[in-house]
């Protein structure tokens, strides 16, 4: 894609989504890459003044839902990464890729209460739902990696891929399919797949033996998903195909990896027992390329829980988690 076409494309995207700000205004480089027939938005966070210094890539796969990477209103800005990127950017160029058919930048006052980008009827855009699949994200992201590793400012001897929540599954599958990846960080994931997290969360909400069989409802839902595993109807949110793909146990391909892997998880997360199982199982197998970092008493996003089991948002642990990642990378 030549420079003039790329500039025109960005102008069209900006006009279509009504963006009034650009990623550059927030300190990010923005590249638009063509993947099949789609435009892929790539944001790059580098240490200021070292944008062209050769460094390895740290590719971060974000979690679920169609949210713009940059959400702002007036002078209020939500972080693109869940952690402060300054420490990691000293040694790496941080990469994050936008969700398909979702604007890169948006005033959060124009989004849903959960900061999702929805259409006038409150639904996720069809372009997003049609591509919100593990089988789409993995090859798309690998194509991005191949493109970026050809750039002069990228060192190719080390390539870190990290993911949180849904992104952990994407990252793990990328590591299984791309030999160029040298380090994997698997955070807040469920090695037994999405449906087990859904069942665990529902079981925790059950209060008696009769009227709150929420876990049973999830299992019935799973029966329907399996019967319709190729269905792309998004009227209820995620398609059956998306749920089926993300519910295939990452444990099956995580266990085959030979590269260094760091597993980070909160012990109060719904997925904690399955990460503990993976940990115990790998100890028995004698696998020494896995490091497990549990954050005791914290939930899915590493917030501690209050006495009534609610996240205590006053205590932010994400920066500590990212610092632990950096320490592990320095040691491996």
Image (spheres, grey):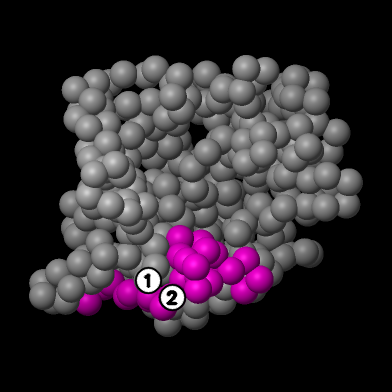
Up-down: is 183 above or below 209? below
Q: Residues within 10 Å of mark 1 (few under 14, many from 20)?
A: many
Q: Main secondary structure of the magenta part?
A: loop
- Whether residue 305 is in magenta: the answer is yes
Up-down: is 255 above or below 320? above
The range drawn in magenta is 288-315
Q: Is residue 294 visible?
A: yes
> In which quadrant is the C terminus drawn?
bottom left
Locate residue 174, reporting x and y percent.
36, 47
| Left or right, 125 with reference to 190 | right
Q: Residues within 10 Å of mark 2 (few under 14, many from 20)?
A: some
- What residue does disc 1 label? 267
At x 78%, y 46%, the residue is 72
At x 66%, y 52%, the residue is 80
| Left or right, 183 with reference to 117 | left
Q: Which mark is residue 297?
A: 2
Dot 2 and dot 1 residues touching (CB under 8 Å): yes
Q: Is residue 104 visible?
A: no
Locate residue 299, reporting x and y percent.
46, 65
Residue toward you, 193 or 85: 193
Locate residue 269, reporting x and y percent.
39, 63
Residue 248's quadrant in the figure?
top left
């Amino acid at each position: 894609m030549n420079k003039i076409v790329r500039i025109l494309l960005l102008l069209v995207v900006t006009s279509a989504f009504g963006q009034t700000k650009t990623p550059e205004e927030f300190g990010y480089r923005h590249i638009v890459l063509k993947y099949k027939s789609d435009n892929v938005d790539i944001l790059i966070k580098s240490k200021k003044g070292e944008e062209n210094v050769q460094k390895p890539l740290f590719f971060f796969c974000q979690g679920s839902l169609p949210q713009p990477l940059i959400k702002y209103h007036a002078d209020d800005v939500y972080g693109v990464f869940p952690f402060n990127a300054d420490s990691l950017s000293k040694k790496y160029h941080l990469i994050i890729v936008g969700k398909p058919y979702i604007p890169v930048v948006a005033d959060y006052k124009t989004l849903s209460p959960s900061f999702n980008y929805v259409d006038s009827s409150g639904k996720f855009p069809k372009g997003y739902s049609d591509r919100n699949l593990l089988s789409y994200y993995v090859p798309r992201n690998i194509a991005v990696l191949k493109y970026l590793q050809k750039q002069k400012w990228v060192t190719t001897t080390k390539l870190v891929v990290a993911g949180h929540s849904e992104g952990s599954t994407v990252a793990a599958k990328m590591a299984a399919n791309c030999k160029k990846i040298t380090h994997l960080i698997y955070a807040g994931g469920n090695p037994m797949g999405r449906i087990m997290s859904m069942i665990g969360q529902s079981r925790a909400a059950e209060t008696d033996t009769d009227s709150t069989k929420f876990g049973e409802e999830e299992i019935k839902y799973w029966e329907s998903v399996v019967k319709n595993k190729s269905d792309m109807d998004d009227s209820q949110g995620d398609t059956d195909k998306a749920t089926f793909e993300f519910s295939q146990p990452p444990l099956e391909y995580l266990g085959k990896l030979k590269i260094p892997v760091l597993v980070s998880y909160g012990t109060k997360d719904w997925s904690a027992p399955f990460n503990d199982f993976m940990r115990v199982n790998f100890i028995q197998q004698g696998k020494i390329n896995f490091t497990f970092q549990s954050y005791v008493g914290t939930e899915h996003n590493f917030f501690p829980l209050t006495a009534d089991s609610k996240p205590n948002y006053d205590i932010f642990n994400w920066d500590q988690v990212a610092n632990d990642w950096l320490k592990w990378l320095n040691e491996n």
